[in-house]
Amino acid sequence: MSNVTVIGTQWGDEGKGKIVDWLASRADIVVRFQGGHNAGHTLVVGDQVYKLSLLPSGLVRGKIGVIGNGVVVDPKALMTEIDRVTAQGLVVTPETLWIAENAPLILPVHGALDRAREAARGEHKIGTTGRGIGPAYEDKVARRAIRICDLAEPETLDWKLDELLLHHNTLLAGLGAETFTKDQLKDFLTEITPRLLPFSCQVWDRLDEARRAGRRILFEGAQAVMLDVDHGTYPYVTSSNTVAAVAASGSGVSPSSVGFVLGIAKAYTTRVGEGPFPTELHDQTGRTLGERGHEFGTVTGRPRRCGWFDAVLIRRAVRVGGVSGIALTKLDVLDGLDEISICVGYELDGQKIETFPSAPGAQARVKPVYETMPGWKETTAGARSWAELPAQAIKYVRRIEELIEAPVTLLSTSPERDDTILMRDPFED
């Protein structure tokens, strides 16, 4: 039996929530290992719709959920989310949700700085959600972060708040934004400490015990490889590493525990926010994909930019993300199109290239080279077996496999949990 790590291979919003929820039926523990509450998963279970940002998707399946040390935690957002899903019937207690005691906190000052800096960027804005994720990660690296374990030590908290405010208030004042007092942050932390501390524990130790006992662990990534702070479309990226290797460091387990890496990809491409997008469609086809796919950000509510499947980007994600197999989602959105295009390469300044460049200027100038295939008139929506798919849809999937150099091991044909075709069970690998 293998553990499984799920990551996005595009710019996020690939349908990870449904896939993780579906796989969670085979797992014992589900772990979030990076990101913050700027990521979102929408899970449809019967007539219930769960929108999760920080909570691991496995909680919907009644599994133990874990928030690892690689996640930056906004305590107010977390408690609001817990209250919301509890009202929907989920059970979230310190027995069902473990939070790493060494996870950094997102404080009100982080969100204020995030928004002030984004406003100051003007036309060069990154498209951040303004929720403080970036500044919180900066504090972690600069060794001034307030971590959950600090809440149990008032004397530690006192001097760390002084250091944190010295830095942030200087920046806020320079940007013409309102500064914070120590009492404001103390009041915020005093309010959330009684609710947050009972969930905190040495996650790494519990996960090691679970591994030794042979329990199946599902690691759940946020965002996607093309938003990775090293490997994505920098600077239009998130503030953390999103590749599978981070599942180990972001939860305190050994690299060998990562197991089978399942990369999630839409049968087309979407992106929220700013940044390069070579296959973006500004025509009716792009609008059709957005309408059929209900393409609005789970967290932001912003409409997603839509375009054709980019095999070059996915192939890169497969290589740097260590992807073992692909879960292809939203195939049904392509039903009824006369033709479907796949990006198989790029042109840059008149030269053909086969990889995506790293420099922002070059990324903005690349032009997609397309291969066009006939579409299909039959429906794929709700298909639960390979035999139910139209022949041309199968050809499309097979061509994708060739181009990205990875097998499609799982296929999703609607938002419904059971409308899934499994070619290979990652947990049996």
Image (cartoon, grey):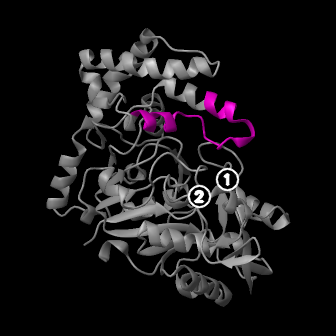
Label ID, residue 136: none
Q: Which residues are magenta?
A: 116-139
Q: Residue at x 38, y 20 (%)?
A: 163
Q: Which residue is mark 2?
A: 11
217 left or right of 414? Answer: left
Nearer-the-camera pick, 79 or 324: 324
Secondary structure under tag 2 reads loop
The x and y percentages for residue 333 are 69, 69
- Crowding at mark 2 (Cα within 10 Å: few <14, some 14-19, many 20+): many
Question: Gap between marks 1 and 2, in whole Å?
Answer: 10 Å
For the N terminus, which image quadrant? bottom left
Q: Residue at x 57, y 21 (%)?
A: 172
Q: Is residue 427 magenta?
A: no
Instruction: Please report whichever mark, 1 or 2, sits nearer to the chain's N-terminal start.
Output: 2
The answer to whether the residue labelled 1 contacts the one labelled 2, judged by CB atoms less than 8 Å apart, is yes
The x and y percentages for residue 257 are 26, 63
The x and y percentages for residue 291 are 76, 59
Q: Is residue 123 magenta?
A: yes
Q: Quadrant of residue 112?
A: top right
The mark lying in front, picked from 1 and 2, is 1
Observer able to see residue 45: no
Nearer-the-camera pick, 84 or 207: 207
Q: Which residue is mark 1?
A: 275
Q: Residue at x 43, y 55 (%)?
A: 221
- Crowding at mark 1 (Cα within 10 Å: few <14, some 14-19, many 20+): some
When the figure is inspected, residue 409 is found, relative to residue 227, above or below; the finding is below
